[in-house]
Image: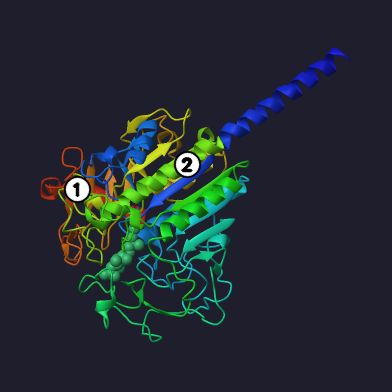
């Protein structure tokens, strides 16, 4: 063999080995564990003392714990919309909390977070809560293929419930079909008028095993002893049992991991806990001493432990990056009398923050976020300001891939901060409450004036609404106690102009 050939072959061997090892590290499995309504103060690693979350504390200890990470919005649908699309949800109407019969609001012809992974050859899966609509219309036949849905926006596999656990239809949908359909008992859903003859929470409160709170509206069709929002009939076999539902999701998540253990996968695992109705498996009931909300958090923590154990057992823990975060802040009474208020016992789900779910104050959108990738990410606490909207641009960077022009344009590449290589987060961030937007730049937060109610009396949460501008110096006043807008009119003007400019931005 000539010297030249020898060199060529050794170069080829070198590059193919290099290629192989890069593949291992550059295509880690990615699991997003996205929980529902978990607050900044709900985990041990974020200071909770009244509730024990050992599995998540381990995740925090072995990875990055972010103190300044945000959902874009203080409710579920818009936060999820932003995470999937990289676009601020308030740019598009119809992205508020969706009813259970809503049509799909994610465009099928644009880049999404799962589609990005799909394009890199990952198998992508979604298990859990969806809440981004299904099909093209509100009126739809639940007894045949329901499309478009998650499978049309980037997921190879999906096992979901359509909206929230407190909204009908209370069924699972697997790859566009309701699970356990019965042609003799077709499903119908209606959000306007009662259909069928089944009891409702309003007419038959004596049938409820979990009492609805007055005036919230969780008093339509009763399923599994719980009044829901909306009416449904049929599909008796298909209806989930709340106590089993999270375990069903867990087993589907595990199946997805197991069947993709030999190839790179992206799993979006959207837990329903601790959203209402809190009805955890019986083994967790009463265990926290904090009512069913606390019990649901114990179940959530246990679930994360189960996934971590599985990754260990399959020998893929080292090659799996886990992101754990929440879609919005905490709420106690969100429709049911489940002990969240009466047995709070000094627990502070919002930590030191003001407000809660629905609020423009910090507790609405500042959420726990942990990122864990053994061997690759150094354990640390990061104060970088980050938004969930940034994942899509950051993973695009991770894969060295350009996002399509004019898509995901609100997403910023924060890869180094997400991987703990830098403490530099966003310079500016816009956050959405129920009625107003806030902008954070560095140390300062400005909330635009608006006429909404100061307090959501139903849930007893301060919404952050004020007809006057609000300015908070977050660095010294994280609890937003002192509105200093009148002392800094120039700064108020600057931030309000900046917010306007972001609002006016096209695409
Ligand atoms: C609200 C519901 C609340 C919850 C929320 C959605 C009422 C009075 N309250 O409209 O119970 O379902 O929507 O929560 O109807 S989220 O986390 O999915 O955004
Ligand atoms: Ca939520």
Q: Position of residue 393 (x, y in %)?
A: 48, 45
User: Splitting the image into four quadrants, where does ligand 1 fall?
Assistant: bottom left
Residue at which label 1 appears: 348
Q: How many marks?
A: 2
Q: Nearer the viewer, mark 2 or mark 1?
A: 1
Q: Residue furthest front?
A: 283
Residue at which label 2 appears: 394
User: On the picture, is 207 further left or further right than 461?
Assistant: right
Name the one closer to the observer, 7 or 151: 151
Residue depicted at 67% across the width and 30% down the height: 19
From what the image shows, is residue 286 above or below residue 238?
Answer: above
Q: Position of residue 417 (x, y in %)?
A: 40, 35
Residue depicted at 42% across the width and 60% down the height: 244
* Earlier residue among tags 2 and 1: 1
Q: Position of residue 245 (x, y in %)?
A: 42, 60
User: On the picture, is 88 further left or further right than 446?
Assistant: right
Distance from mark 2 CB to nearest ligand 2 atom below 8 Å: no
Dot 1: what SS?
Answer: loop
Name the one closer to the observer, 107 or 497: 107
Could one spot residue 438 in this view of the protein? no
Dot 2: what SS?
Answer: helix
The image quarter containing residue 293 is bottom left
- State how far apart marks 2 and 1 are (Cα): 32 Å
User: On the picture, is 239 further left or further right than 383?
Assistant: right
* Mark 2 closeness class: few <14, some 14–19, many ≥20 residues within 10 Å: many
Could one spot residue 63 in this view of the protein? yes
Name the one closer to the observer, 109 or 19: 19
From what the image shows, is residue 160 above or below residue 58?
Answer: below
Q: Position of residue 205 (x, y in %)?
A: 25, 78
From what the image shows, is residue 13 above or below residue 497?
Answer: above
């Amino acid at each position: 063999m000539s010297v030249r050939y020898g060199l060529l072959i050794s170069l080829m061997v070198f590059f193919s080995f290099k290629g192989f090892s890069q593949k291992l590290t550059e295509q880690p499995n990615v699991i997003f564990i996205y929980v529902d309504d978990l607050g900044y103060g709900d985990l041990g690693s974020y200071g909770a003392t009244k509730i024990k979350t050992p599995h998540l504390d381990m995740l925090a200890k072995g990875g990055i714990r972010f103190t300044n990470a945000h959902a874009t919005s203080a409710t579920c649908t818009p936060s999820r919309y932003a995470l999937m699309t990289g676009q601020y949800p308030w740019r598009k109407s119809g992205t508020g909390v969706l009813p259970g019969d809503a049509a799909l609001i994610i465009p099928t012809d644009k880049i999404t977070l799962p589609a990005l992974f799909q394009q890199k050859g990952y198998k992508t899966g979604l298990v859990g809560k969806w809440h981004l609509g299904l099909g093209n219309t509100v009126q739809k036949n639940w007894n045949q293929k329901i499309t478009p849905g998650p499978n049309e926006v980037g997921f190879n596999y999906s096992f979901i419930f359509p909206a929230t656990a407190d909204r009908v239809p209370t069924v699972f949908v697997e790859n566009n079909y309701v699970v356990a359909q019965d042609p003799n008992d077709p499903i119908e859903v209606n959000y306007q008028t009662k259909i069928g003859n089944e009891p409702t929470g309003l007419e038959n409160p004596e049938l409820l095993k979990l009492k609805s709170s007055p005036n919230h509206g969780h008093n339509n069709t009763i399923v599994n002893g719980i009044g829901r929002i909306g009416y449904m009939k049929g599909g008796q076999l298909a209806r989930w049992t709340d106590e089993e539902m999270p375990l069903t999701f867990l087993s589907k998540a595990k199946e997805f991991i197991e069947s993709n253990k030999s190839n790179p996968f992206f799993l979006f695992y959207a837990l329903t806990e601790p959203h209402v109705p809190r009805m955890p498996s019986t083994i967790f009931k009463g265990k926290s001493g904090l009512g069913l909300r606390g019990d649901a958090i114990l179940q959530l923590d246990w679930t994360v432990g189960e996934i971590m154990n599985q990754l260990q057992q399959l020998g893929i823990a080292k090659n799996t990056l886990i992101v754990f975060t929440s879609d919005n802040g905490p709420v106690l009474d969100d429709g049911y009398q489940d002990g969240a208020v009466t047995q709070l016992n000094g627990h502070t789900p919002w930590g030191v923050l003001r407000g809660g779910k629905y609020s423009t104050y910090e507790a609405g959108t500042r959420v726990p976020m942990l990122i864990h990738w053994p061997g690759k990410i150094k354990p640390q606490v990061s104060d970088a300001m980050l938004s969930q909207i940034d994942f899509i641009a950051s993973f695009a960077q991770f894969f060295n891939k350009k996002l399509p022009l004019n898509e995901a344009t609100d997403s910023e590449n924060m890869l180094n901060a997400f991987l703990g290589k830098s403490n530099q987060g966003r310079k500016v961030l816009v956050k959405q409450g129920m009625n107003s937007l806030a902008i954070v730049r560095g140390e300062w937060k400005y909330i635009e004036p608006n006429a909404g109610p100061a307090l959501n009396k139903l849930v007893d949460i301060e919404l952050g609404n004020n007809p006057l501008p609000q300015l908070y110096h977050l660095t010294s006043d994280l609890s937003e106690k002192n509105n200093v807008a009148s002392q800094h009119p120039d700064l108020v003007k600057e931030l309000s102009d900046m917010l306007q400019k972001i609002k006016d931005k096209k695409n």
